[in-house]
Amino acid sequence: MFLGVDLGSSSIKLSLFDAEQGAVKGSVSYPKEELAIEAKQQGWAEQHPDLWWENFLTAYDLLLKKTGADPKTIKAIGISYQMHGLVLVDEDQQVLRSSIIWCDSRAVNIGSEAFEALGSDYCLPNLLNSPGNFTASKLAWVKEFEPEVFSRAHKFMLPGDFLAMKLSKRITTTQTGLSEGVFWDFNERSVSKKLLDEFGFGEELIPEIVPAIGADITIDKEVAQELGLPEDVKITYRGGDQPNNAFSLNVLKPGEIAATAGTSGVIYAVTEKNAYDKKSRINTFLHVNDEEAAPKNGILICINGTGILYSWLKKILNTGRGSIDYEQMNEMVDSVQPGSEGLLCLPFGNGAERIFENQLIGSHLLNMDFNRHENRHLLRASLEGIVYALNLGFEMLSDLDVPQNTIRAGKANLFLSKSFREIFVNVTGTRLELYDTDGSVGAARGAALGVGFFSTEEEAFASLTKLEEMEPNAELTAKYQALYQDWKQSIDKHEFYKF
């Protein structure tokens, strides 16, 4: 049995995977209501890591009760986690401040200044990104604005590294994680000393680096006893949520593409090239199965305001009498024709968006007509806007010579909506394959691969089940492409962003 953990900003999900049967024994997600994100100022977003640990412990107990599984049968643990966050601990492994998470925008200017100082001739070919709003820039923000906290910092970590620390009492990270934080020099295949020097970071802040797949990190004995685990259980897999989502879908080879539509929406394409966008609107990181002899990178297109927009609408619709769930919302969307009778939605209300060069665009409704538009139009316009936003980034892949024929996704979150799937397929003009998997199951498969239960990637995914597939419809593609162009022109017309 293998335990997979998916630490998100909305909840934490755990799955037990029976690798011998190739089947999931059970899964739980906790809490049921989305975790709060603390925003002390506009554009800020924080969560306390201790809350993640408390939720993990609760979810773990719920999983054992649900499945009736003996924790002594767990052979290894895999961890997936929300990318780009910053966790700081002192020498006693105590958290020094709340985590500055992925959708926090406070470090945009610091990253832009570092990009100018280091120069695009270094940043783009070597980091494959601007320091932008990633973990390195967030650490620099703490150094500048919270010097007392920074002075007590022993190590920085990403969220998944924190969870691994709580389980093992060792502070470790991975090359893939360092690339997600934009600490990694892809040409030197090492931590970027130029970036460290620019920000004034000492190398002692960097945790011990271990492999993403196959790490040899044993759970702390006391923790193992508390959780009922064997004392030799190891953490053998770790990946950021989007590389892990791709891994979960068996997207491991150059030319393969994954998508997800959870809190944020992502297109993730695997390539062997050190590809970069000249404006850093899309970003490249090491993929979880990268090897020096067989390089593999993941090109990431991210839209912050996807599932979080839909959940916000759910809250708004439930402020009166009665209640409405996502299934009912999806049915309301299905009752509206493509185009939402002219209503347009810009889904950019969750921090600075990379596809707009880290500008804060904000979310907007355009062309609202009080005599025509109802809740159902708002819901459909939102789903259309989310796909249109993803397609902005998807178009940029063509500039990087990345094949765009088939996209794989888990049948979850927004992909549960029939209309969302139809909009997605016909706006992007690609074939969509939906699979029965998620991030926690992928992390569990990764643990089994990392500990050697599976000897190859092909073995690890032999039991992955395809649920359905969709092809673009020529008539619908033409209609949606026209609607997409209208939406795009509205962004330009209102000067939210100039393409």
Image (cartoon, rainbow, N blue to C red):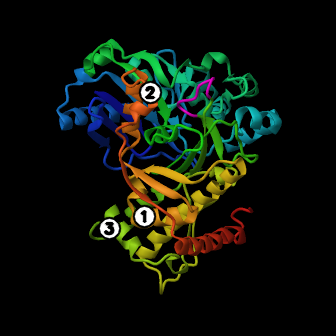
Q: Is residue 324 visible?
A: yes
Tag 3 secondary structure: helix
Tag 1 secondary structure: helix
Give the image quarter of residue 55: top left
2 and 1 marks in contact (CB < 8 Å): no
1 or 405: nearer the viewer:
405
Relative to 34, 353 lies left or right: right
The correct choice, above or below, for 37 with respect to 413 in the image is above
Q: Main secondary structure of the magenta part?
A: loop
Outermost bottom residue: 371
The correct choice, above or below, for 183 with respect to 394 in the image is above
Relative to 48, 189 lies left or right: right
Under mark 2, the amino acid is Thr
Under mark 1, the amino acid is Leu
Coordinates of residue 422 in the picture (x, y in percent)? 46, 66
- Residue topped by disc 2: 456
Location of the C terminus (image quadrant): bottom right
Query: Sequence order check: which comes first, mark 3 or mark 1?
Result: 1
Relative to 125, 265 lies left or right: left
Query: Sequence order check: which comes first, mark 2 or mark 1?
Result: 1
CA separation in Å, label 2 and label 1: 43 Å
Coordinates of residue 145 in the picture (x, y in percent)? 65, 34
3 and 1 marks in contact (CB < 8 Å): no
- Residue topped by disc 3: 328
Magenta segment boundaries in residue numbering: 287-294
Q: Marks 2 and 1: which is nearer the front? A: 2
Query: Measuring 67% from the left and 31% from the top, which residue is drawn there?
Result: 140
Residue count near mark 3 (Cα–Cα under 10 Å), binned few <14, some 14–19, many ≥20? few
- Residue topped by disc 1: 313
Coordinates of residue 366 in the picture (x, y in percent)? 58, 74
Number of residue marks:
3
Relative to 121, 491 lies left or right: left
